[in-house]
Amino acid sequence: MTIVTGKTEARRRLQPGKSGVLRKIWEHRADYAYVLPAIAVMLVVIAYPIYYTIELSFFNTPPGLQLRDKTFVGFNNYTAILTSAVFWKVTWNTLIWTVGSTGISFVLGFAAALALHRDFFGRGVLRAILIIPWVISAVAASYIWKWIYHSDFGIIGAVLVGLGLADRPPNFIDSVSTVLPSLIVVNIWREFPFAMIMMMAGLQTVPDQLLRAAKVDGANAWQRFWHVTFPHLRNVSTVTILLLAVANFNSFIIPWIMTGGGPSNASHIWITHIYELAFGRQRWGVASAYSVLLFIILMTFGYFYVRALSGNDRKDGSA
Amino acid sequence: MSTIAETAARGQARRRLRFDGWRWGGRIFLVFMLLYTALPMVWMLLTSIKSGFAAMQFPPQWWPDQPTLASYQKLLDPQNSVGQDFLRFFWNSLFVSTATTVLSVIVAVPAAYAFSRFTFPGRNFLFFTVLLRNMFPAVIFLVPLFILMRAIGLVNTHGSLVLTYLTFGLPLAIWLLKGFYDNIPVQLEQAARIDGATRFQAFILIVMPLSTPGIIATAIYSFIGAWNEYIYAYTFLSKNEQLTLPVGIQRFFSENTTDFPGLMAASFIMSVPVVVLFLVLQRYFVRALTEGAVKH
């Protein structure tokens, strides 16, 4: 990690005592040139929007984007959100969506990675097929599944009727009770391959000698997995779960295209709700306040994310 | 002697038996996952070669009675208006994704190299700032970015999309590439520099070739991300002739709500480039994740 070129080391030794952040920055001025383009793009597209969102969350805005007419309302937008029934409904949906999608995607992906770890005929082809849903656009996936769930001509409904499990095709995405689980199935379809790739990569780092040694010592398959394989994968698992959780918390396309948040908000999650507030009802102030609340939640995620990643680095540095 | 051999054999048999249990469990699970993954795609393909009438039947025609490529012909025919639109969307997507990919690589390579090799004040802070971008959903940035793009006159141009997509791809790109550079021994560069190469030459001649898989992975990731992006394209573009595929397909569907074969054909055509690209280059991608994301 910490690689100091001989040159800078020497320079530092020549001028002892004169340590100051500014001097250090000046010494490394050339290094910044490498990261400048990345940072510049990030600043424009991230820092400015964050600032603007926070500002807007304290204002009441007229419809349309005539933002000169906004009026300062203090924390009104926040109290309006936290006292509304929709907020709690949407938060509950988001929780189910995020935890359900992340948990099941991870378990399926991990299991698939384990099953694919051993070499067998057709393994490469199978792996490639399993990864395809992750590459397909979420818009295309939404339409494919919308057609599969179709209440009149959907294939799942037809199969259920054909097997005698239902009298008529069920309404998967037009019914309040089934819509969210149905969408989660679609989301998992797209997300488990990511967990699978990550865990496959992780499995390759488990030393074979340890597994063989455990086998010699009489450990059965489950014990070998639990005491040797799994501890090695703890870091990868953490990163994978966090990335999945963030991606799911932030998903938009699948609920938006498949149901638009309906019926009666049953499939609205935070992001679709914010989008509808902003671009549907043009309540920019409230939408911004929602976004700020979202920031706060995400920063909590972010804290663990950075910790998991830098934990990785620290181990790397000492090795 | 014989008893020992017998017990050993029995033990081995038992072990193999239990072993097979796991193996069979794995196989059954893989078959289940294969069905879950592949059936929706198969159904998409089967629907896309039906006529509109054949698709709307209950019980459905599992296999189309009269397979037809009419939907594909309609979408890919530059003579009729649907085909014209669709081909234009296709080219727009291709242009935006390619531009994004090229720029991502140009910006990410030096940044990742610097994060890996140099120690400058604020390095960790900047690195995590870049990574944190991944945390935030597109929707949060939508309103302010829309206003920003309007202010700098980029609304309704592909430039607005390239600029925003760049920032999606960058965090993971930088992270993956940094992992690659971390694994390339500094001594290689030092040797080159002792032989008289400048830092830049050492970078171009030694580090770049070694990190090619990482760069390819980065490029695939950027391309797929840009190709599939929907929200910004949906918000920033309003002129029909500039739409990218995901938005174009949505518009197509809202105008022809019952043309499911057409919709499935469009979804299929839209998926082909990224799926092919990924399948051809996937080993680089998996390798980049192994070396970049998963540290040994």
Image: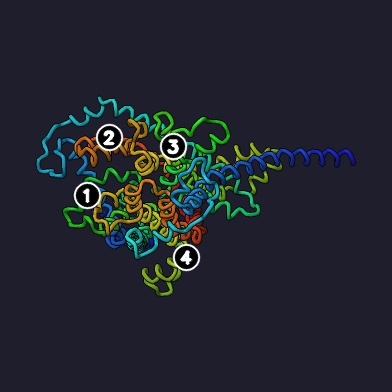
Residue type of the residue flagged with mark 4: Leu
Residue at which label 3 appears: A151
Colouring scheme applied when the structure was drawn: rainbow
Q: Measure how far apart labels 1 and 4 are at the Cα level.
A: 40 Å
Marks 3 and 2 sit apart, C-alpha to C-alpha, by: 37 Å
Q: Residue drawn 56% across and 45% down?
A: B35
List the residue tagged with mark 1. B146
Closest to the observer, A9 or A194: A194
Q: In which quarter of the image is residue A254?
A: top left
The tag earlier along the polypeptide, 3 or 2, is 3
Tell which subunit mark 4 falls on.
Answer: B
Kindly identify the amino acid type of the residue bearing the numbered disc 2: Leu
Q: Name the residue under label 2.
A: A293
Q: Mark 3 lies on which chain?
A: A
Q: Do labels 3 and 2 share a chain?
A: yes
Q: How far apart are marks 4 and 2 (CA)?
A: 44 Å
Residue B122 appears anywhere in the view: yes
Q: Select label 3 or label 2 by which is in front.
A: 3
Of labels 1 and 4, earlier in sequence is: 1
Q: Where is residue A17 in the image (x, y as percent from the top left)?
A: 27, 53
Secondary structure state at the residue bearing disc 2: helix
Find residue B210 and name its label. Answer: 4
Figure label count: 4
Q: Nearer the viewer, residue B238 or A117?
A: B238
In terms of secondary structure, where does tag 1 sit? helix
